[in-house]
Image (cartoon, rainbow, N blue to C red):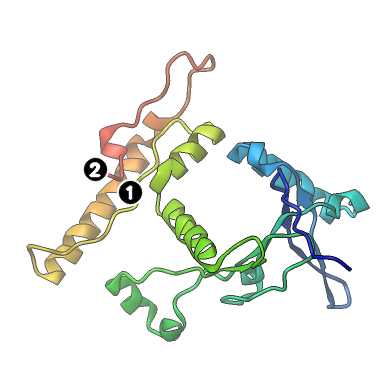
């Protein structure tokens, strides 16, 4: 009876899908909720996530732990699925599916050495199943595009994470590879030599990055010879 209504939540409660394999080989899915995620720092969310997973593994969840999710994250990629489109649950605006981190399907059987030579990276597919009453297709696409930007280091994403986790060094920014100016063989040799040099430098001078001041009176600095971005 009447016109269906849409209730707009003021908080972001994230449901975390956790797959459990039983002793008989069957599987069950539990989706506990991390509440008020919009108020949490990255480290704060990490602690809440660890607490929720600990309750799942020790079978200490209560009915209240499952209530109130406004968005869920499911991770079928842990069992090798490249992507999936989960069904939207009542009361939620969207479910984000995270696929496996692997080489593109067309290159899955390629020679690993060739993939290294070509610089082919593993990829991950994210899907967004959304309630069309509150989220339009363009908005969903813009959301996934924004996630892509974050994962490549835009909007100060990794700087914020490093600060939240207490990492005193700046993150290395994502950069596009290039081979201009020289032959491919020369570029490959030069890059390999630089990688070997960086590894050797970390082995001999990596201690310079250690946090040895118990009072944290002086913030450690990144030695230029250990900076991968230089």
Q: Of 37 and 174, which appears nearest the observer?
A: 37
On the image, numbered disc 2 is attached to which residue? 230
Q: Of 17 and 121, which appears nearest the observer?
A: 17
Viewer can see residue 76 = yes
Label 2, secondary structure: give it.
loop
Q: Residue at x 74, y 62 (%)?
A: 17
Vertical placement of 185 versus 45: above or below? below
On residue 132, which mark appears? none
Q: Of 90 and 48, which appears nearest the observer?
A: 90
Residue 217 is situated, as x and y percent measured from the top left of the image, at 47, 13
Q: Residue at x 65, y 66 (%)?
A: 75
Relative side of 25 to 101, left or right = right
Residue 110 is situated, as x and y percent measured from the top left of the image, at 39, 84
Tag 1 and tag 2, C-beta contact below 8 Å: no
Q: Whole-Å distance between the Cαs marked 1 and 2? A: 14 Å
1 or 2: tag closer to the N-terminus: 1
On residue 199, which mark appears? 1
Label 1, secondary structure: give it.
helix
Q: How many marks?
A: 2
**To which quarter of the image does residue 133 belong?**
bottom right
Q: Quadrant of the C terminus?
A: top left
Viewer can see residue 62 = no
Residue 210 is situated, as x and y percent measured from the top left of the image, at 44, 29
Vertical placement of 69 versus 219: above or below? below
Vertical placement of 142 versus 114: above or below? above
Q: Residue at x 75, y 58 (%)?
A: 6
Q: Quadrant of the N terminus?
A: bottom right
């Amino acid at each position: 009876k009447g016109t269906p209504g849409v209730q707009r939540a003021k908080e972001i409660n994230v449901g975390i899908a956790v797959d459990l394999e039983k002793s008989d080989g069957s599987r069950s899915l539990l989706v506990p909720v991390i509440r008020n995620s919009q108020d949490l720092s990255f480290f704060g969310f990490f602690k809440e996530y660890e607490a929720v997973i600990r309750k799942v593994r020790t079978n200490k969840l209560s009915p209240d732990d499952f209530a109130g999710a406004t968005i869920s994250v499911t991770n079928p990629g842990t069992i090798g699925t490249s992507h999936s489109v989960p069904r939207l649950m009542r009361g939620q605006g969207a479910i984000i599916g995270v696929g496996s981190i692997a080489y593109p399907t067309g290159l899955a059987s390629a020679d690993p050495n060739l993939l290294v030579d070509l610089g082919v990276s593993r990829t991950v597919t994210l899907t967004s199943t959304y309630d069309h009453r509150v989220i339009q297709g363009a908005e969903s696409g813009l959301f996934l595009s924004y996630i892509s930007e974050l994962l490549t280091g835009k909007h100060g994403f990794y700087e914020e994470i490093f600060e939240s986790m207490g990492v005193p060094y700046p993150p290395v920014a994502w950069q596009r590879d290039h081979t201009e100016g020289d032959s491919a063989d020369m570029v490959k040799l030069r890059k390999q030599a630089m990688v070997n040099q960086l590894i050797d430098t970390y082995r001999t001078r990596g201690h310079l990055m250690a946090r040895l001041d118990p009072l944290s009176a002086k913030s450690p600095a990144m030695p230029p010879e250990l900076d991968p971005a230089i």
